[in-house]
Amino acid sequence: MQWYVVHTLTGHEHKVKKILLKLIKEKNMEDSFGNIVIPVENQVRIKKGKKVVEEKRLYPGYIVIEMEGNDETLRLVNSISGVTHFLGSKTKPIPLGDGEVDELLKQVRESKAKVVTKIPFAEGERVSVTDGPFTDFIGTIEEIHPEREKVKVLVVIFGRTTPIEFGFHQLKSL
């Protein structure tokens, strides 16, 4: 078996995988197919003041399939709604090399294991405080500390600019 890259409509990766697994089972072709991988990473976002872990696709619109590269399997995959084509020429898809597969699977394993925090702000951005004793104060971001999920904001208190540290969840962009 070899690994092939399949281009799908962006956002349809999970749907294509689900349909493909169903078709493989219905047609008793389990011997011709191996793993089906959608390269994703876990990403933390702040939504309504709470941390939410979401999957983010590393390669939107692509899935990687381990399969026998015969006419029957290629026809089955191409028949699925949402699949546009295999990577390679129109008539003969090109399988990935062993090094490429190892690197891709390593990247997927590592990105699944670690959780990346999405930084919702930029330095110099104006923000409003939504939580804590400084609620409704407006300030400008001076520093961002993504590893601690903290931001240093310059807020005017009693006519003086004061740096105050807030968590990502305590602020919203203006």
Image: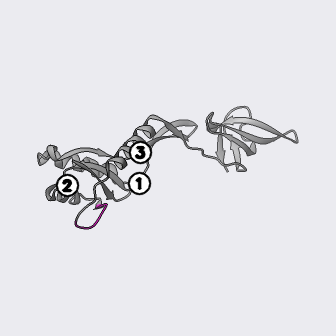
The vertical placement of 163 against 23, above or below, is above
- Of badges 3 and 2, nearer the viewer stands 2
Residue 38 in view here = no
Q: Which mark is residue 106?
A: none
Which residue is found at the position 37% from the left and 56% from the top? 61
10 Å crowding of disc 3: few (<14), some (14-19), many (20+): some
Nearest to N terminus: mark 1 or mark 3: 3
Q: Nearer the viewer, residue 96 or 50?
A: 96
Q: Earlier in the sequence, mark 1 or mark 2?
A: 1
Side of 7 relative to 19 (left or right): right
Give x and y (percent) for residue 69.
Answer: 20, 55
Q: Amino acid at mark 1?
A: Pro
Q: Is residue 56 left or right of residue 30?
A: right
Point out the residue furthest to the left here. Answer: 28
Q: Image quadrant of residue 89?
A: bottom left
Of 100 and 113, the residue lying toward us: 100
Residue type indicated by callout 3: Val
Q: Which residue is mark 1?
A: 60
Residue 165 placement: quadrant: top right
Tell me what residue is drawn at x 30 percent, y 56 percent: 6
Report which residue position mark 3 lands on.
Answer: 40
Residue marked by disc 2: 69
For mark 1, give the secondary structure: loop
34 within the magenta span: no
Question: From mark 3 to mark 2, how far is it between C-alphas?
Answer: 25 Å
The residue positioned 42% from the left and 43% from the top of the image is: 107
Asked if 68 appears above or below 117 in the picture, the reply is below
